[in-house]
Amino acid sequence: MAKNYMKISTNFSQFPELKLDEQQIKNCVRKHFGTIKAPIYLYIDHKLKTAHGLHAARNMNHFHKISLSYKHLSEAKSSAIKKSVECKDWTFPEWPRTHRFYHSYLITLLTHELQHARQVEQGVQYRRENWMGYDERIEDKDPTEYDACMAEFKKADKMLRSYCER
C-alpha cells in the first residue's frame, strides 16, 4: 500500500532575503504533522502586520493556508533581541549554535499554526484539564488557542531539532 504523501506548497522563493530552507521546513512538517491530510500552503504575507501568523482552512479539508507575517519574520531575523523582548511570553526552544533565534521563532510560529490545521481535521489534542502544569504560562484559555500553545511546548523543540539537522 502506498504511503499518502503530504502536499506542501510555499511562496518562500519570493523572499530570498529570509533565507528559509524550504525543503527542510517541508521535511519537518511532514515528520511532525504528518497526520494532516489536506494539502498545506505556507504563505509569507506582506499584508499581515498585527498577527505573527494565521491559519485558514478552505472548504473544510480542501487545503490549509498558513500565513506568516513578513514583517515579523524579517524583524526576528534582523533584530532578535527586540523581537525576543516583544515575544517575552512565548516559549522558544533552545536553538543550536549553528542556528539563531530567528529559526526558533519561525519553528515556534509554524508549530502553533500547524496545530490549528491539525485541529480542523482531528479536533483538539491537548485539553486544558490534562495540562494544568502549563496553565499559568498560557494566557488564552480558549480551547483551540490553548491547544496550539501546548503544541508549542510539546512539539516546537523536536521540530526545531529536525530543522537544524542537515
Image: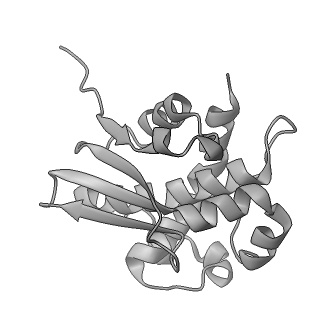
Q: Is residue 18 left or right of residue 98?
A: left
Side of 132 relative to 7 (left or right): right
User: Residue placed at 17% from the left, 14% from the top?
Assistant: 1
Q: Is residue 55 above or below residue 26?
A: below
Front residue of this view, candidates 108 and 100: 100
Quarter of the picture containing the C terminus is top right
Q: Is residue 166 visible?
A: yes
Residue at image point 64% right, 74% down: 134
Residue found 63% across the figure and 47% down from its top: 18
- Residue 88 position, x and y percent, is 76, 76
Give the vertical position of 86 relative to 27 (above or below): below
Residue at 68% across, 79% down: 137
In the displayed structure, does residue 101 sit left or right of residue 30?
A: right
Q: Tell me if I can see residue 92 in this picture.
A: no
Q: Position of residue 62 (x, y in %)?
A: 14, 51
The answer to which quarter of the image holds residue 17 is: top right
Indicate how the structure is coloured in the image.
one colour
The one nearer the camera, 48 or 26, is 48
Q: Position of residue 109 (x, y in %)?
A: 56, 60
Q: Residue furthest top?
A: 1
Residue 155, compared with residue 67, is above or below; it is above
Count how many numbered circles sit on residues in the image. Answer: 0
Query: Where does residue 39 sit, x and y in percent of width and height?
Result: 25, 42
Question: In terms of depth relative to the viewer, which is nearer, 60 or 143?
Answer: 60
